[in-house]
Amino acid sequence: MNAPLQPDLASLPPAAPIQQLHHYAYKSRDAEETRHFYEDILGLPLYHIIQSDYVPSTGEYCPYTHFFFRLQDGSFIAFFDIGDDVKPEPSPNTPLWINHIAFRVNSVQELENTKARLEAHGIEVLGVTDHHIFKSIYFFDPNGIRLELAAQVADADQMEKDSQVAHERLNAWTARKEQWRKERAEGKVNTLLKPETNDRPEFVPQQA
């Protein structure tokens, strides 16, 4: 893997302070089906619609309805209905549990309440799952998009403490991955690279 180019940082303008997520955008099989799920079940209000025949960023012809649901912080999750009645396909080389969007709620009780609400509408829900710093539930929307609701349980001090070692831990992973790539190229390994530290030992199968 080629190393990325390193520009002269002193000659560049500063990075813009990114304030918050503006929106995620996904393909929708059907706008009303998607609206019912996000507005009537999850409680996110439909807030804005853009409709056009041409895509502004590329200029290509592709008629669409682009519609937005507003979160409490003013950010959005958005969708495109391009009128083909087709669900988006998952990535062929990525496990279904990886690509997802997580929304924060205020408490574990709200997770439980939402789980009950979803299940009453016939939606399968996984969890509540304990991630130590937060707890979550998981489910799929009508378009096959995996969603997570998360309630933070770690306080600011714990998160700040974790942030102090994040670069160190990622650098260690990167060094091990570079060695793994070298050994794989030499035919010395044919297994996946595993982390050196397992933060979730409770999920390791116990030997009989």
Image: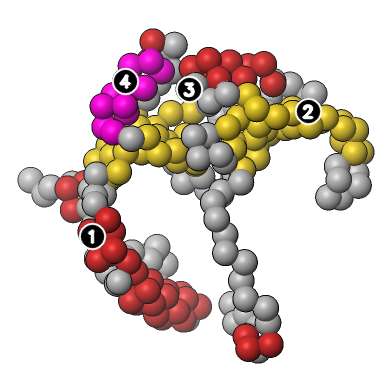
Distance, label 3 to label 2, CA atoms, is 21 Å
Q: Quadrant of residue 137?
A: top left
Rounded to the nearest angstrom, the CA distance separating label 4 from label 1 is 28 Å
Q: Residue at x 61, y 43 (%)?
A: 23
Q: CA distance from mark 1 to mark 3?
A: 31 Å
Q: Position of residue 207 (x, y in %)?
A: 11, 49
Q: Main secondary structure of the magenta part?
A: helix
81 left or right of 178?
A: right
Label 2 environment density (alpha carbons within 10 Å; few <14, some 14–19, many ≥20): some
Marked residue nearer the N-terminal end (1 or 3): 3
Query: Is the C-beta separation of discs 3 and 2 under 8 Å?
Result: no
Mark 3 = which residue? 42
In the image, residue 118 lies in the stretch drawn in magenta: yes
What is the C-alpha distance between the residues marked 1 and 2?
44 Å
Residue that label 4 marks: 113
Q: Where residue 177 sits: x, y (%)?
A: 42, 74
In the image, residue 56 above or below residue 146: below
Above or below residue 15? Residue 68 is above
**Sequence-wise, which precedes: disc 2 or disc 4?**
2
Residues 82 and 48: in front is: 48
